Image (cartoon, helix red, strand yellow):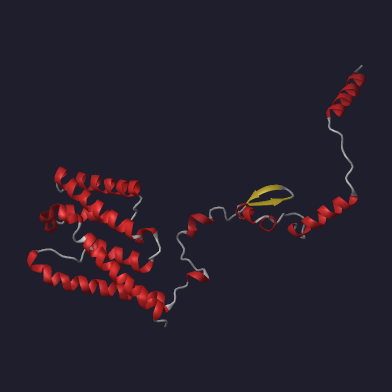
């Protein structure tokens, strides 16, 4: 009886299976020859990078062997890559890439210093820390989003005005700094005008007593006014860099 049940089970199981079609030997040889470049000579590993460029990230994290899938030791490599300098050949700066941004920053601070001497009787200054950060963005990474003119002036004017409002509401307190910085970041994200140096303008106004009498004029001076001068210097530097090759 048991043999009949077992035989009937195998008969029913095989009846449910789809029929197997014969595969020509030429097709098998063609398949094996087409996949042979992707199988290493040891026969234990599959070269995923040669099989598909899109799967190269998989091969960096896992290793397929005949014993199964084994985690590779470089899974955590991306965590440390951001702490290392970029050593690719394309990232090696030339002398021109070093000289002209430095020359532009020097010229900008020299002009601002001369303007400070003129504005000294009024107790205000053009040489503020945010403009140093703007100089680095403009001269070193002129094609970055933070160097776009829209981002720069929208963020400079908006964040400076936010600093004035926060100071008016909360005074020179930790709450004013926290609210001003949070509102500035929200403003830049909402208006799509990300410009990191502008985030320091509200803090500069709240802690800088010399700017308090400017009130809402602080939205235009010295931040936005200084950016106009920096943009002019950047155009001159770019022209000289393109025409004076050394």
The reply to whether residue 218 is visible in this rendering is yes
Q: Quadrant of residue 228?
A: bottom left
The reply to whether residue 173 is visible in this rendering is no
Name the side, left or right, on which 47 lies relative to 106. right
Q: Residue at x 16, y 47 (%)?
A: 167
The location of residue 83, given as percent across then percent down, is 45, 60
Q: Residue at x 20, y 55 (%)?
A: 219
- The count of marks equals 0
- Image height of 67 relative to 122, above or below: above
Residue closer to the observer: 188 or 207: 188
Q: Quadrant of residue 170?
A: top left
Name the side, left or right, on which 189 lies relative to 55. left
The location of residue 84, given as percent across then percent down, is 47, 63
The location of residue 173, given as percent across then percent down, is 17, 46
Name the side, left or right, on which 163 lies relative to 243. left
- Image height of 61 relative to 6, above or below: below
Q: Residue at x 89, y 19 (%)?
A: 5
Name the side, left or right, on which 214 lies relative to 107. left
Residue closer to the observer: 32 or 64: 32
């Amino acid at each position: 009886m048991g043999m009949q049940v077992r035989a009937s089970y195998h008969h029913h199981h095989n009846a449910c299976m789809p029929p197997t079609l014969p595969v020509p030997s030429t097709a098998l040889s063609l398949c094996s020859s087409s996949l042979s470049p992707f199988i290493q000579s040891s026969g234990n590993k599959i070269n995923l990078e040669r099989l598909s460029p899109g799967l190269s990230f998989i091969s960096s994290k896992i290793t397929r062997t005949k014993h199964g899938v084994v985690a590779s030791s470089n899974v955590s490599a991306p965590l440390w890559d951001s702490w290392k300098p970029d050593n690719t050949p394309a990232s090696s700066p030339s002398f021109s890439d070093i000289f002209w941004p430095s020359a532009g920053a020097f010229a900008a601070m020299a002009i601002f210093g001369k303007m400070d001497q003129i504005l000294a009787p009024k107790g205000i200054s053009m040489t503020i820390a945010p403009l140093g950060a703007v100089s680095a963005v403009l001269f070193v990474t002129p094609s970055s989003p933070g160097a776009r003119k829209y981002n720069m002036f929208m963020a400079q004017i908006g964040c400076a005005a936010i600093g004035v409002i926060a100071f008016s509401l909360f005074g020179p307190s930790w709450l004013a700094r926290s609210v001003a910085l949070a509102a500035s970041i929200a403003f830049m994200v909402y208006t799509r005008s990300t410009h990191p140096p502008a985030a320091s303008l509200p803090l500069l106004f709240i802690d800088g007593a010399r700017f308090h009498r400017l009130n809402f004029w602080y939205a235009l001076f010295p931040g936005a006014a200084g950016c106009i001068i920096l943009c002019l210097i950047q155009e001159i530097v770019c022209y000289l860099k393109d025409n004076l090759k050394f």
